[in-house]
Image: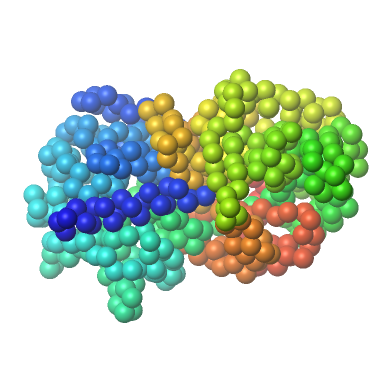
Amino acid sequence: MGMRDAVRRRICAAVVVTIVVLSACGGGPPATPGETPRPGTGVLVLYDTTGQYGDLGELYAVQAGNLASHFGKWDALPVSWYTAGSAARHKLTIYVGSTYDEPLPDAFLADVAGGAHVLWMGANIWQLIGRYGGTGLRTATIDEAAVTTVRYQGTELTRNAAAGAMVRVGTTPGADVTTLADAVLPDGSVVPYAVRAGPLTYITEVPLTYVTFDDRYLILADLMFTLLDPDAPGRHRALVRIEDVGPHSDPAQLRTIADYLSGRGVPFSVAVFPVYDDAGGIYSGGVPVHKTLSTAPAVVDALRYMVDHGGTLLMHGYTHGMAGARNPYGVSAEDYEFYRAHVDADGTVALDGAVPDDSAQWALGRLAAARQEWTAAGLTPPDIWEFPHYTASATDYRAIATAPGIRARFEQVLYFSGVLSGTPSGNRSVSQFFPYVVDDPYGTPVIPETLGNVATQRFNQHGVRLAEDLLASARRQLVVRDNVAGFFYHPFLGLQYLPQLVEGIQQLGYTFVPAPSLL
């Protein structure tokens, strides 16, 4: 195997692991070959398509486009379809170089060399350097050093070494090239991680793999402001969401949490599912349990109390599970509702695909049933939605997102291969969180959740995550100049960790706001 093939296979292998493990107006279908991108589009996203893992390019394009959507419209197409002058008709062109030695059109290289406003990530920058030497970048070589830290604006961000090789660039002496971020090598020395050479901004990898809340992905998120809204003032807002509230919840706990948050002047959201099932009696000594909001007046009163004290209710599915089936446990709040899952022998939760008979009609039926139960309980059905466990099929995402009366989703999101072309499949998927509101391809604004939750013990593949960990992530996320840091909190924890989180986030300089105020 030649060196080039060896590097290609190592890069692709790292990407595949990421896709499997990773727990404005959005882009529409790509143009047809040779078609001029639709006029009026603010950002053009170009992606690779060749090779064994060429379909990953579209997933990267979706993620880049989502970030761009915060600033306006975006469009996407394979880089091979690029036509001369397209970049000049856009405020920014983003190229995601995910396939080693993807054949790049001469027209694209010429436009970049000619001064087009371009953000280039990852591979194939050597094609530009080899053909046009006047960009300020002189050399580009593969660097397989195990980089785990990237420094940006005085903050050390994390990077999983499993993300694989990066590109090491050399600059032309005397050229107007600025280093924006540094990769820290194992020996403590640094090399450029992101540079600006005139109208070209270059990131030495695609920072969309093995992403965590503390990750170098935040650099990409902030550079979007540099490139699309450089005059945006610094602003740091925060969200807290009380999670998995249902007919089984303890009304006293809900009131206690509302009292604390209200006393701190902190608006909050409450994610509610209206029907609770424990068909196997797992938590009731073998006695089946079925509860609804309409038969839990104390919980309903507590929800009204939360609203009166600054809470915003949102809809968190219908049953947060599959009645009569283990998905994977057989209890609401623990199970998936819009996707199938099982637990492997090693305790890992694995996603299996769409539920039986999945369709837009089925998903809308769940929404209608949930709304009916909210109404029966005397509550107004919310217009903000959160999918249970942040997981659904592409069909379900689109059905709920475009349903009348749903104006936003509050979640991290799962994207599938083919989402841009309109033919999504379950072959590959990737999850993404956002440090600001975006408009994604499924059809609604997405409100950010960026910090996760307190987990006091390891469960499945999810490790322990304490309040200190969430605060450390919130501090790192300050590198995004106008960000939203959001976390969720389970009411059964009472006030054991909530004050530390809320007050710690406030001390970092964040201001808590109501989720609807971001829309």
The answer to which of 128 and 512 lies nearer the viewer is: 128
Q: Could you tell me which residue is drawn at 66 percent across and 53 percent down?
A: 488
Which residue is outermost to the top? 361
Residue that appears at 80% across and 47% down: 282
Q: Residue furthest bottom?
A: 187
Q: Position of residue 47 (x, y in %)?
A: 29, 40
The total of numbered circles placed on residues is: 0
Q: Would residue 349 appear left or right of 131 to someone viewing this image?
A: right
Instruction: Give left or right: position of 264 versus 223.
Output: right
The quadrant holding residue 357 is top right
Q: Which part of the image, by quadrant, shows the C terminus?
A: top right
Camera sees residue 403 = no
Left or right: where 233 falls relative to 61: right
Residue 405 in sight here: yes
Q: For this view, does 377 lie left or right of residue 268?
A: right
Q: Position of residue 260 (x, y in %)?
A: 80, 59
Considering the image in quadrants, where does the N terminus appear? bottom left
Instruction: Give the residue displayed 12% in from the left and 68% down from the top.
Output: 173
| Residue 6 vs residue 30, the one in the foreground | 6
Residue 152, above or below 396:
below
Which residue is depicted at the point 20% across and 25% down?
34
- Residue 489 at x, y percent in the picture: 70, 55
